[in-house]
Amino acid sequence: MSKTLCYFKGEYLEENEIYIHPLSPSTQYGLNVFEGIRGYFDPKDRCFYVLELEKHLNRLFESANKLQLKHKYSIQQIEIIIQKLLKLNQFDEDVYFKTVLLISQKGSWSQILEADLLIVPWKLNRAFDKSKKCLNLSISSWERISSNSMPPSVKTGANYINGRYAFLEAKSKNADLPLFLNNKGNVSESSGSCIVFIKDKTLYTPPLSADILDSITRQFVFEFSKNMLKYNTIIKNLTLEDIRKSDEAFLCGTSIEIFPVGTIDDISFSYGEKTITNKIKNFYFKLVRNETPYTSKFLKKIML
Ligand code: PMP
């Protein structure tokens, strides 16, 4: 089987050819910024539809700016690299691009050093097995990091240690994933995805000020649910009381896509064929595979 080619510092290399110094600030302190970007494979046209590529790259650059990670790349250059990786690797199923700006040389967390671009593509269909119908969440005793300490809007590796504590705790309670509250006691997000609740055909999700990442999937889902599926969409702070009164809940994010939530601790939600979540999920997959007339503004088509 041929090995996957990645991009690193101007070259197309196999994973085992990539060298990062063991004492780089990225390996020592998680000082990097990254994006997960999905490409949906169309076997008929032998092409990929890359979802919201420009938004992901804009967010990558905004994260880099906030941490003063200097680099020499433009959005157009990274788009060309991603196109080339798809062509070189000739993938024949959905792909996920881990796109990272990191410091590969030896250094400290405080230095201003030039960041290098690493893009590692891998085959990724759905995040969970087909047999999994819903996720069980547990409210974390860990608080979500806040904008005054580690801004969750910056997608840096170091932020994921907060997610790890919560994830480990959730696993110890036999839950699939945690649900964070923020330092005000409002609902925030999960460890790698945002949350949406549904009550009386209206979608609710916490605002950015609830210490969430400005999820591109959350924006996308709210846009099509409002404009194409004609649901009401409300962004507001949500309390545990609000959760308790909700009919349905789902997680959304690039990796998890849209996934129904069955329980949050002792609170149960409807999931399955007849739910609004299912309708939104089905529409999502039609949009990302270019099977509706509305799609083109969200997708970049790349021929193999
Ligand atoms: N929150 C966190 C902490 C995440 O890591 C992710 C995944 N990127 C999300 C939310 C969802 O964001 P997006 O829809 O942009 O992938």
Image (cartoon, grey):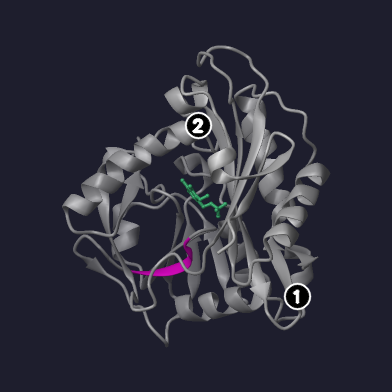
Q: Is residue 201 left or right of residue 92?
A: left
**CB at mark 2 closer than 8 A to ligand 1?**
no
In the rendered image, is residue 144 in sight? no
- Determine the image quadrant of residue 166: top left
Residue visible at 34% across and 72% down in the picture: 134
Tell me residue 191's x, y (percent): 39, 48
1 within the magenta span: no
- Determine the image quadrant of residue 249: bottom left
Residue 294 numbered tag: 1
260 within the magenta span: yes
Note whether 142 is above or below 133 in the view shown: above
Q: Residue 6 versus residue 77: which sits nearer the camera?
A: 6
Q: Secondary structure at mark 1?
A: loop
Note whether 246 is above or below 157 in the view shown: below
Assess whether mark 2 and mark 1 are in contact (beta carbons under 8 angstroms): no
Boundaries of the magenta span: 256-261
* Residue assigned mark 2: 151
Q: Secondary structure at mark 2?
A: loop
Q: Amino acid at mark 2?
A: Pro
